[in-house]
Image (cartoon, grey):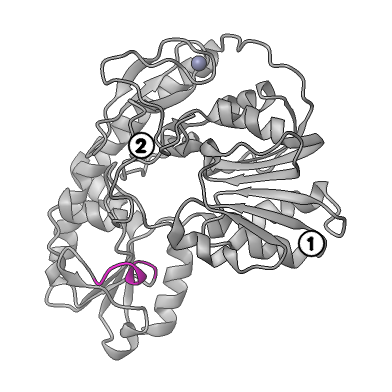
Amino acid sequence: MSSHGNISASSDNAPLACDFCSHRLQPRYTPDRSTRGLTVHVCPHCGLVQSGPRVARTKDRHKAAVSGGADWGNVRYGKGFRTGAAMDALARHVDLNSTFSLLDVGSNRGSFARALLDAAPQAALTALEPDERFAQSVGTLARTRLVQARIEDMAFADASFDIVHSCHTIEHLASPFTTLRDHARILKHGGLLVIDAPNIALIGGDDIVEEWFIDKHLYHFSARTLSRMITAAGFSILEQVDSADPINLLFVARKTGRAAAPAAADLAEVEQADRLLALYQQARARNLAALTHAACELAALTPRKVALWGAGRLFDLLVTEGGFNPHQLSLLIDSHLKQHMDNRHGVKLDAPEALRQTPPDTIIVMSRGFAAEITAEAKRLAPGADIILYSDLLSRARLQCAA
Ligand SMILES: [Zn+2]
């Protein structure tokens, strides 16, 4: 493996081979605003969706880019939200009061590490985190060995761990199948893998507007493709935690050590991947077009004082694709992004408390996943304001497009 921490080089023109079954990939889709020049491919044999070329990591990985396009990155939201699900899954298969060793792949800010150390008084943790900005936050924990490196560059001894936990990491790697087999190698016999990754099923939603195929993700798993790879890497799957969750794929698997059979063809999966990609492109094009109408509806609210809560990817697209003028806002609220930057598209970011000092007439909730939480908090902070939800805004805009 590379000693530079680079993703394995493949020249731009060389045909990509499937990481799982080695068949030659077929290009299907070019993401918007990819700074890596990525193309999304479908494996015509196993149906695994993967991006290429598998180019070297970007150098400016510390720069926050809040974009609705593929160049989005480095503002990490996700992992902390998955800690509860991972701990619950672990508790169903392990006696947390027993003595065990656990490798946490991609510890990030240590949300899972802390929860594990709290719940498992005898556990010994190895926390693997390459990013020095985050590594230090786990380096001081008790019963914890911090290794500041990438899993791809590590060579832990055979049968070193009882448990490997990997949360939203596998999709970034040059070769997930190589890493899954390595997870099996470093686990003791009967050891557990708890693995979580984004679910490509999400792109089948008809309200999608952000580019899902971001530069940081090279692999785009379905429940079927990820479970096949885990099994072929030498595991038996004990549990897919919530098979109805369109956002995450969380699996618990036990090491069997059985040698992998060559990946058989799965033409139903190939068809499903092609169908998803086609639906995604149609829905996204329609929704991006609708953002222009959404921006018009919001522009017509003046001279009312309008606050917008949620300055992330949807907001970026409302401005860049919909032509919304963010300077018409009285407040732009985002408690998370405020920690990373002071303004978005030239408009100052404020914390939610600003709604008390400068009560608006209307609050636009520019979020899907957290709309309920934001709405509740907005009503508490500015009880007199009308609330407009992004989902309603988009529905109305789409009707206008159709008219
Ligand atoms: Zn394949």
Residue 386: x and y in percent read 32, 75
Q: Residue sitting at 36 percent across and 44 percent down?
A: 207
Mark identifier at residue 213: 2
Kind of residue at badge 1: Ala
Q: Which residues are magenta?
A: 336-342
Tell me if residue 199 can be seen: no
Q: Label 1 CB, ligand 1: below 8 Å?
A: no
* Other-residue count near label 2 (Cα within 10 Å), few / some / many at <14 / 14–19 / ≥20: many
Q: What secondary structure is found at the residue carrying circle 2?
A: loop
**Residue identified by numbered label 1:** 120
Residue 98: x and y in percent read 87, 56
Left or right of residue 131: residue 344: left
Give the CA separation, mark 1 to mark 2.
37 Å
Q: Could you tell which of marks 1 and 2 lies nearer the N-terminus?
A: 1
Q: Label 2 CB, ligand 1: below 8 Å?
A: no
Residue 381 or 342: which is nearer the viewer? 342
Rendered position, 171 above or below 120: above
